[in-house]
Image (spheres, grey):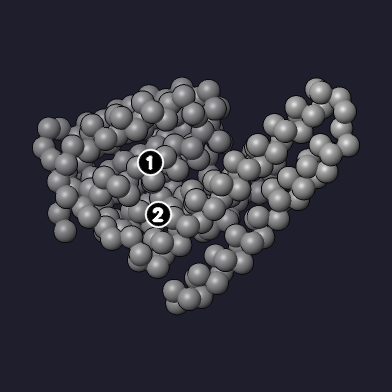
Amino acid sequence: MALATQRELTGAVSHELRTPLARLRFAIDALVDEDDAGRRELAVQACERDIDELDALIDASLMLARLDMGALEVDCVPGDLGSLLAQEAASLAPLLDGKQLSTDISLGPQPLRFDARLLPYALRNGLRNAARHARERIRLSAWLDESGQICLAVDDDGEGVPESQREAVFTPFKRLDGPKERGSRGFGLGLAIVRRVAEAHGGQALMQKAPELAGARLLMRWPDRE
């Protein structure tokens, strides 16, 4: 099963690499014969964007493969989850395409069980995914539910995800065929990583409707105790 998953991932990564590599090759060819300084600068910027895209794809693919193969040892220990979430939100806010990020972290003072190395990967991918779809606003919420599970939610005010497609968004390299997805540079790996991290915590990741912002809600939840 793991071998089949890795073969599928390898094939998908190879397919995704072709587009930025083709753009990069085209831009480099243009640079060779371009004498105009302005057009040369534009070509250089295009090369830099494609190199960044390749780097991001490789990083995300390696992370997903390590999670799928069980190569990352999960170390869930009690800690200050609220502080980690606040720090991550503050560091990511300037990188969310100008969208406004608000937080509602209601976890209380008690230590909670999580992996401080893995969880930021899920949070970053969840917030970046929301930034691609939000119109103006994103909200990060955290709370303990009545059963004692830790809940993290990333809400946006975008178009939301149809109920029939809410499970499909967690499939690696799956992108919904909507106007905001066409032409997007996302790889369809972010939400797959979110789900793998949630499962590594003994929990789950779900796509729902945001109750207040009316767009999509990405919900992660896992038990505070093993």
Q: Amino acid at mark 1?
A: Leu
- Which residue is denoted by mark 1 in the rendering? 123
Q: Amino acid at mark 2?
A: Arg
Task: Let me know if residue 164 appears in the view.
Answer: no
Q: Residues within 10 Å of mark 2 (few under 14, many from 20)?
A: many
When the figure is inspected, residue 201 is found, relative to residue 36, above or below; the finding is below
Disc 2, SS: helix
Q: Residue at x 76, y 29 (%)?
A: 42
Could you tell me residue 210's position as x and y percent?
42, 36
- Marks 1 and 2, Cα distance to the nearest angstrom? 11 Å
Q: Residue at x 56, y 47 (%)?
A: 55
Could you tell me residue 199's position as x and y percent?
33, 58
Disc 1, SS: helix
Dot 1 or dot 2: first in sequence order is 1
- Which residue is denoted by mark 2 in the rendering? 195
Q: Residue at x 46, y 24 (%)?
A: 94
Horizontal relation, residue 81 to residue 199: left or right: left
The quarter of the picture where the N terminus appears is bottom left
Could you tell me residue 176's position as x and y percent?
61, 49
Comparing labels 1 and 2, the label whose residue is closer to the camera: 1
Q: Which mark is residue 72?
A: none
When the figure is inspected, residue 195 is found, relative to residue 131, above or below; the finding is below
When the figure is inspected, residue 202 is found, relative to residue 23, above or below; the finding is below
Task: Let me know if residue 74 appears in the view.
Answer: yes
Horizontal relation, residue 212 to residue 85: left or right: right
Could you tell me residue 135's position as x and y percent?
55, 27
Q: Residue at x 43, y 26 (%)?
A: 93
Horizontal relation, residue 163 to residue 106: left or right: right
The quarter of the picture where the C terminus appears is bottom left
